[in-house]
Amino acid sequence: MRATPEGTRRFAQRQPIARHSNYRQATDNLWLATLGHGTYLGEADDATDAAYRAAFSESLARGCNVFDCAINYRHQRSERALGAWLREMFASGALARDEVVIASKGGFVPYDGAPPDDPRVYAYEQFIKTGYAKAHEFAARYQHCMAPAYLELMIALSLENLGLDCLDIYYLHNPETQSIALSTPTFRARLLDAFETLELAVQRGQIASYGLATWTAFRALPDAPDYLSLTEMVSLATEVSGQSHNLRYIQLPYNLFMTEAYAFENQQLGEAFLNTIEVANELGLTVMISAPLMQGRLAVMESPKVAAALPDLHSQAQRALQFVRSTPGVCTALVGMKQVAHVAENLALADLPPADGDVIRALYNKV
């Protein structure tokens, strides 16, 4: 079972009429809420697990059907907390599997509930000694790997943690971590192997689609070592699996302080240079945004110009989120939330339409 266009549409149509403008159709025809629930922050303890589960329920009640995690978040505890909550929702009938979009990521080495005494020894014992990867396939001091057998293991572990048969979106997590340390041919070869592994996972029914979740790669200068070209990424996916490839999503940070995704024309498409969001849309990739509140800092920092442009909102957090989800070409802003009160404040936006794109464009002369 996985999310479907019919199921996600059913979820959206079941919401109050005021929320109907809160959903957008992705490239794969799923209907996604414009505000999704992220799971990056928090301590790796039982109290945070419980807080997240309560926050997930509040998000669901406010129309959220997009939940995003990664196997390394909180040392696998974010996935496990989300999985426990999902099992409760499915068993109670409060949510159907085909109505909800679940995403996770693989690349960074995940620890099991808590950090080990020596991360290098842990990587050797868990992945090198067992044959899932070779030592030279790791980067960042044994913190990152995207070797085929390693990715296959990561997918299997994420499915187990989440209690799912299929992940709707599976991201290769910060692949620029590898590009910084490798020659261009070696990095390209590793990406090809990773994409082939992900395409095979689609064929096996373990994931429905895949993407690239990045931090700097799509915001960097084209000559920077951590830069990734969107057209090249699609070209690699096409080389692996033809025009029917399943590279469908990208994820990158974008907020009032980190505006490169929309303001910086660093991606080449044909003869033109355009911003990342524009090029992604042209290439048929759905844009998911991380860090819309810059890990909470924008929730307490006032911007008079933004407040004037978005006057009918009640907090700076709402204005910052409205800015992101209203930016033309953005599908969903993923907000990290582990407190019910924060969910209630942030997802009150679901009852309001996004701002007109011209309002956001006008802000770029002022922000």
Image (spheres, rainbow, N blue to C red):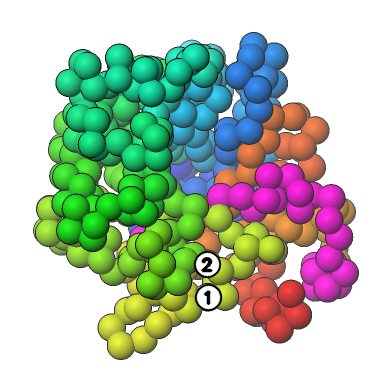
Q: Are marks 1 and 2 in contact (CB under 8 Å)?
A: yes
Q: Indicate yes or no whether the magenta region holds residue 289.
A: yes
Rendering coords of residue 214 (x, y %): 44, 51
Residue drawn at (35%, 78%), measured in percent from left and top? 268
Q: Position of residue 321 (x, y in %)?
A: 69, 55
Name the one closer to the observer, 314 or 180.
Answer: 180
Q: Amino acid at mark 2?
A: Ala
Quarter of the image with the N terminus in it: top left
- Left or right for 31, reference 299: left
SS class, disc 2:
helix
Distance from Cα at disc 1 to Cα at disc 2: 6 Å
Find residue 124 and report its image quarter: top left
Position of residue 354 relative to residue 160, above or below, is below
Q: Is residue 137 above or below residue 288?
A: above
Q: Which mark is residue 105?
A: none
Residue nearer the viewer, 112 or 322: 112
Q: Label 1: few (<14), some or many (≥20) within 10 Å?
A: some
Q: Which residue is the site of mark 2?
A: 261
Vertical arrangement, residue 316 with respect to residue 264, above or below: above
| Left or right: residue 218 compared with residue 283 | right
Question: Image quadrant for the C terminus?
Answer: bottom right
Q: Position of residue 315 (x, y in %)?
A: 85, 53
Judge whether residue 101 is colored magenta: no
Three-letter residue code for mark 1: Phe
197 or 33, nearer to the observer: 197
Task: Residue at 38% x, 17% y: name it.
Answer: 122
Residue 207, quarter of the rendered image: top left
**Front position in the image: 22 or 184:** 184
What residue would you read off at disc 1?
A: 264
Q: Residue at x 34, y 40 (%)?
A: 139
For residue 273, side relative to residue 95 (left or right): left
The residue segment tinted magenta is 285-310
